[in-house]
């Protein structure tokens, strides 16, 4: 679509408090300021309204619920924008430029990119399994890496703190 990015946004939610049928949580969508997007609740089709404060991050806008090619042909089942919990009827969705996920509030400031702020990463010795397997798939026991706990190790990039070490 465009290469423009937006640096402020707001959560928008259903004024009647309807929930997202997939998650069971509130129907909410990130709308970058100045985009003119007007999402509607998938349950009652009322315009969603801004809630909470301003979000800071970076987002770009991508198409959603549109045919896959210019001739109007769909690849896969067509989607109904009126019930899409990704774009909420706008046919456009805000994508976080840091994690590339739709609906992300953009709270990545300072988070370690290697572990997404979790502080742990999958162990390379056991491929995150916690056990080692031979080529035939037979379990050869617990991971020999003494730093491995249940298939994860402390993130080497942030030393397990979840915060970027860049510039420190």
Image (cartoon, rainbow, N blue to C red):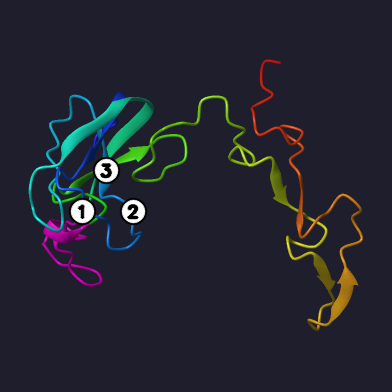
Question: Disc 3 versus disc 2: distance between alpha carbons?
Answer: 12 Å
Residue 47 visible in the snapshot: yes
Which of the pair 27/164 is nearer the observer? 27
Which label number is shown at residue 38?
none
Asked whether 71 falls inside the magenta stretch, the response is yes
Question: Magenta region: which residues?
Answer: 65-84
Q: Is residue 22 left or right of residue 100?
A: left
Residue most extreme to the top: 167
- SS at badge 1: loop
Question: Disc 1 versus disc 3: distance between alpha carbons?
Answer: 13 Å
Which label number is shown at residue 18?
1
Question: Disc 2 versus disc 1: distance between alpha carbons?
Answer: 9 Å
Q: Is residue 131 left or right of residue 58?
A: right
Asked whether 7 falls inside the magenta stretch, the response is no
- From what the image shows, is residue 78 above or below residue 105? below
Q: Which residue is mark 2?
A: 25
């Amino acid at each position: 679509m465009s290469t423009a990015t937006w640096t402020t946004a707001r959560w928008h939610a259903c004024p009647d408090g309807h929930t997202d049928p997939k998650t069971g949580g509130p129907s909410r969508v990130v709308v970058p300021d100045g985009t003119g997007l007007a999402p509607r609740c998938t349950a009652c089709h009322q315009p969603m309204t801004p809630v909470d404060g301003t979000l800071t991050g970076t987002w770009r806008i991508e198409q959603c619920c549109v045919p896959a090619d210019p001739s109007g042909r769909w690849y896969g089942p067509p989607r109904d924008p009126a019930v899409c919990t990704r774009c909420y009827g706008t046919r456009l969705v805000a994508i976080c430029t840091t994690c590339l996920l739709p609906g992300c509030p953009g709270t990545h400031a300072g988070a370690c990119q290697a572990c997404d702020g979790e502080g742990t990463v999958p162990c390379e010795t056991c491929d995150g399994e916690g056990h080692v397997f031979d080529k035939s798939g037979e379990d050869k026991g617990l991971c020999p890496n003494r730093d491995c706990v249940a298939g994860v190790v402390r993130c080497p990039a942030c030393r397990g703190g979840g915060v970027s070490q860049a510039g420190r």
